[in-house]
Image (tube, rainbow, N blue to C red):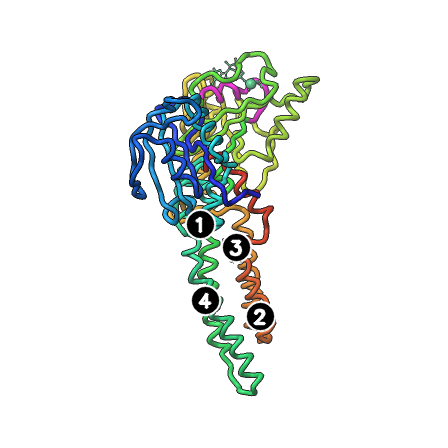
Amino acid sequence: MYKLDDTIFAQTTVPGRSAVSMVRLSGPEALNVIKKLFRPSIQDFKSHTLKYGRLHSPLEKNKILDEVIVSYFEAGRSYTNEEVIEVATHGNPIIINQIFEVFESLGLRLAEPGEFTYRAFVNGRIDLTEAEAVHDIISSKSKQGYQSALNLVNKGLRLKLDQFYNDLLLISAHMEADIDFNEQNIEVDHRGELIEQMSESQKQLSDLLGNYINHELVQQGVRVLLYGPTNVGKSSLLNGLLGYNRALVSPIEGTTRDYVSEKLYYKGLEIELYDSAGLNSSAEGLEKLGITESLNLIPQMNVILNLSDTGDFSNQKLVLGSNQKELQIQTKSDLMTDEIRGSHCVSSMTGENLTFILDQIHEYFLNQNFQADDGLMVSKRAYSHLKSCSDEFQKAFSLLKSDESFEFILFHLNRARSALNELFYEKNDEAVRDKIFSSFCIGK
Ligand SMILES: Nc1nc2c(ncn2[C@@H]2O[C@H](COP(=O)(O)OP(=O)(O)OP(=O)(O)O)[C@@H](O)[C@H]2O)c(=O)[nH]1
Ligand SMILES: [Mg+2]
């Protein structure tokens, strides 16, 4: 995939205009190149210090590229473990482009997405679970998500698994030794002790897996569908929850055709609301297409706000997956008589109970099996390795308890260990590594 021996650069901040932009260089030529361009000229640059000055262009005489602050991180003590320079410039794309032209003219290469983090991995500074966590910190759509990714980025998972991994090694070594002794006709039987050790390890592993956080949900945020018959007030509720008018509202049935989606942030959580075409059994043509599209959205949703302005939900029954939640809500409560008033009533007109809905969505999110502070938010890839480690371990344990020979048991223990090795390194599978790093943004 990526080349490893050249010097690469990229903007680490978002492209566009801003007070400051940051450009990172990594590789053997990073410091040399900056020394060529920076004035006043650099005599002695200590690692982890800053220099203030100007970058000059070697392409045009007396041309100053920008006034900058440059930081230096020596190889072995940097993000990539290579020589790294970071240049803070004024945040103007024209300046950045000119600096990039100069870097390229000096033989440096624009980095691919994820390439800095890939180098950190290849150079042994981080393992794959930490690389994934770097990505999650940036892309997380809930505060729980980025907090647990932060836990993970600092050798979190490796530290948690170290003890377990070492115990596995010890148990295997015991078994190998017993096999050797028995081959020499020396009778030893440590089975009882091994059962005790394995049940201790089993506990560690199940604690770990039990703390698994629904990665997808904390990364994606919560998707919420506004669902119900035409004119029930779906688009009005969307606008009410957003606090501004995003969708058209009218007393004409079938106003919304294409679904409309918009994000809002509530208590540190990204909620994506989908307003859809209202259900109408006599719909035809475009309206009917819109309804089909709404129904197709259901499987991708986490929460469905099933809306009715009569309190009668019998014609809008939903079949949902086990992790999906339906909230039945009565709309237009300002028009409601006391007789039909149910327990969950909202009004987009008066704003009654709009925060109640947001709280319900937030609560659903919190109930999805994780404890934010100590939780273990790992990717699907990582979870599947943990799971196969656990499965192999369970097989080994039950064979041990049913008096099977150590050779069979060792087979499964070895597989449990290699599942953990793959979790952190996945050395042989370039495709998986490509997938992990290419999902990064440029500059990371
Ligand atoms: N009094 C009152 N009227 C409402 C409320 N919510 C919506 N309406 C009215 O109900 C009508 C339909 O509202 P919409 O939000 O367009 O309904 P919808 O469910 O999006 O309708 P379709 O897009 O046609 O499926 C409009 O005239 C709104 O002004 C409410 O809370 N109180
Ligand atoms: Mg509508």
Instruction: Give the CA separation, mark 3 to mark 2.
Output: 19 Å
Quarter occupied by the C terminus: top left
Marked residue nearer the N-terminal end (3 or 2)? 3
Q: CA distance from mark 3 to mark 4?
A: 16 Å
CA distance for labels 1 and 2:
32 Å
Tell me the amino acid under the disc marked 4: Asp
Q: Secondary structure at mark 2?
A: helix
Q: Is mark 4 within 8 Å of ligand 1?
A: no
- The residue pinned by badge 4 equals 167
Q: Residues within 10 Å of mark 1 (few under 14, many from 20)?
A: many
Quick check: marks 3 and 1 in contact, CB under 8 Å?
Answer: no
List the residue tagged with mark 3: 386
Disc 3 to disc 1, how far (Cα)?
18 Å
Q: Which residue is mark 2?
A: 409
Within 10 Å of disc 4 (Cα), the crowding (few <14, some 14-19, many 20+) is some
Residue 7 numbered tag: none
Q: Quadrant of residue 72?
A: top left
Say if mark 4 contacts mark 2, CB within 8 Å: no
Between circles 3 and 1, the one closer to the viewer is 1
Q: Which tag, 1 or 2, sits closer to the chain's start?
A: 1
Magenta highlight range: 227-240
Residue at position x 31%, y 36% in the image? 42
**Element type where label 1 sits in the image:** loop
Name which of mark 3 and mark 1 comes first in the sequence. Answer: 1
